[in-house]
Amino acid sequence: MSVSQMATSRLYKLVQSFCSTRNVNLPVEQGKCLYELVENGVELYRAHFLLDSQHSEYTSPIAKILFDASTQRWYFYVPTYRYDLLRWIPYKPLPHSKKLEDFFTELENDPQACFWE
């Protein structure tokens, strides 16, 4: 198993645990955390629910975490839209880190109020 495979495997376990923990402790009307595996990383989404609904009405992207094998760093992105097209831009307070846990701390605490508003 290569370094990047081990790193992304670790990411998948962390993101699954993060979303599960967050979703258990949060009312559905505040949105649930979902994720999608992408090459060398994950994209995280917030599922929006109507009152008294068990199915999400829509999802919105909140963050993307990618591993760069050449630099051995994790990169953290947030969504932006330009001409109605989704683009991922570096999260300015913490654009990269060697410690994956830093991003999950940022997601959990949301100091910029940009993930779970």
Image (cartoon, rainbow, N blue to C red):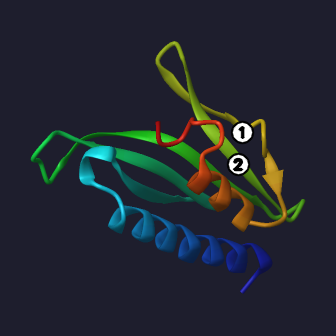
Give left or right: position of 7 versus 117.
Answer: right
Q: Nearer the viewer, residue 84 or 96?
A: 96
**For residue 7, side relative to residue 96 (left or right):** left
Q: Position of residue 64 (x, y in %)?
A: 60, 49
Residue 60: quarter of image: top left
Label 2 SS: strand
Q: Quadrant of the N terminus?
A: bottom right
**Residue found at x 45% / y 57%:** 36
Which residue is identified by label 1? 91
Looking at the picture, which amino acid does disc 2 mark? Phe
Q: Which residue is mark 2?
A: 76
Residue sitting at 65 percent across and 71 percent down? 8
Is 104 positioned to the left or the right of 3 in the image? Answer: left
Seen in the picture, residue 70 relative to 3 is either above or below; the reply is above
48 relative to 101, above or below = above
Q: Residue furthest left?
A: 52
Density class for disc 2 (Cα within 10 Å; few <14, some 14-19, many ≥20) is many
User: In this orientation, which residue lies closer to the viewer: 20 or 35?
Assistant: 20
Callouts 2 and 1 close, C-beta under 8 Å: yes
Above or below, comparing residue 51 to residue 41 in the picture: above
- The kind of secondary structure element at disc 1 is loop
